[in-house]
Amino acid sequence: MTSRLRLSDALTRFVFEAAEVRGAFVALDQATRGILACHPYPPPLSRALAELCAGSALIASTLKLDGSLIVQLAGVGPVRLAVVECSDVLDLRATAQWNEPAIAGLAADATLVDLAGDRKQSRFTITLDPRGGGLLYQGIVALEATTVARLLEHYLTTSEQLQSRVVLQTRDGVAAGLLLQRLPGPSAHDDATWARLEISVDALAPDSLLANASPMDMLSTLFPRDDLRVFDPRPARFHCSCSFNRVRNALRIAGRREVEAAIAERGDVEVTCEFCNRHYTFAPDEARDVFSSSDSSAGDAPAPTRH
Ligand SMILES: [Zn+2]
């Protein structure tokens, strides 16, 4: 059983002892603050990314994941792209591309449809990216003008065939989320428990998950009548998987012509990780060396942008 760890930056799974219901509670503080500090995200986007961080950690907790879960919004309006990645060890990172004037008119609680600009032309996808390559499993989630929590709830209910409830709350870069799932095994008792839990979820105050309590205290406040088996909290953090080797690989994929163009333009090659904003600078010899070297190390590229 778990200790009285601080609430933030951890995911805690639990099961109801007296009903076929499982759940997870996640609270992110330093993790989301670190992610959101990488870029000057406008408030509605910042809020959406924080919710997607908490939501992707909750989804990851339901999977036997060996690799990463990637949640991506591809829009045609104020936001062109918003990506959140959560690894199996709850390493989180995010990035986005947006149009500043277009997003300036949106309310802080704009929906993903508002951010994407058009429901039909935009895509909201959830992808499983196994470690070491292999198949990517992609689910396309119908983009509706509703909350991130509702979208993820719908995704879980259809993809896992389990009735699911998701609550996501954010404030000032801090995010928290609650997931409940009803496991297979129909019984009148479970029907009644699930109905009761749905009522308590619907009745949650807008910032009730953001209280600075330990997971144990939070869960006993949320479910005072239920006997829960609570598993040890797992730490979550902001961690970007970019590295010098991955950037070398990205340069190799970009090609010699791109690299020579950068050298001609600015004297060296600088690659910026679009997730964590870390800069990697290559002198001309170092940049050209990636094409002569025989090593093809380091996995996939971090999709760099060149400046
Ligand atoms: Zn990075």
Image: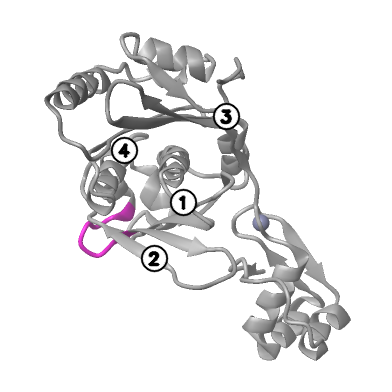
Q: Amino acid at mark 3?
A: Asp
Residue 137: mark in rendering = 2
- Separation of residues labelled 2 and 1 (CA atoms): 13 Å
- Separation of residues labelled 1 and 3 (CA atoms): 25 Å
N-term mark: 2 or 3: 3
Using a 10 Å C-alpha cutoff, classify the residue at mark 4 as few (fewer than 14 neighbours), some (14 to 19) or many (20 or more).
Answer: many
Image-quadrant location for residue 131: bottom right
Tell me the mark number nearer the camera, choosing from 4 and 2. 2
- Separation of residues labelled 4 and 3 (CA atoms): 19 Å
Residue ID for mark 1 = 64
Q: Nearer the viewer, residue 252 or 220?
A: 220
User: Is there CB contact under 8 Å for labels 1 and 4?
Assistant: no
Q: In this picture, is 226 found above or below 244?
A: above
Residue 29: mark in rendering = 3
Q: Amino acid at mark 1?
A: Lys
Residue depicted at x 40% and y 19%: 228
- Separation of residues labelled 4 and 2 (CA atoms): 21 Å
Tell me the mark number nearer the camera, choosing from 1 and 4. 1
Residue ID for mark 4 = 149
Q: Ligand 1: which quarter?
A: bottom right
User: Is there CB contact under 8 Å for labels 4 and 3?
Assistant: no
Residue depicted at x 74% and y 87%: 260
Q: Nearer the viewer, residue 13 or 84?
A: 13
Using a 10 Å C-alpha cutoff, classify the residue at mark 1 as few (fewer than 14 neighbours), some (14 to 19) or many (20 or more).
Answer: few
Q: In this picture, is 112 found above or below 11?
A: below
Residue segment shown in magenta = 116-124
Q: Amino acid at mark 4?
A: Ala
Image-quadrant location for residue 249: bottom right
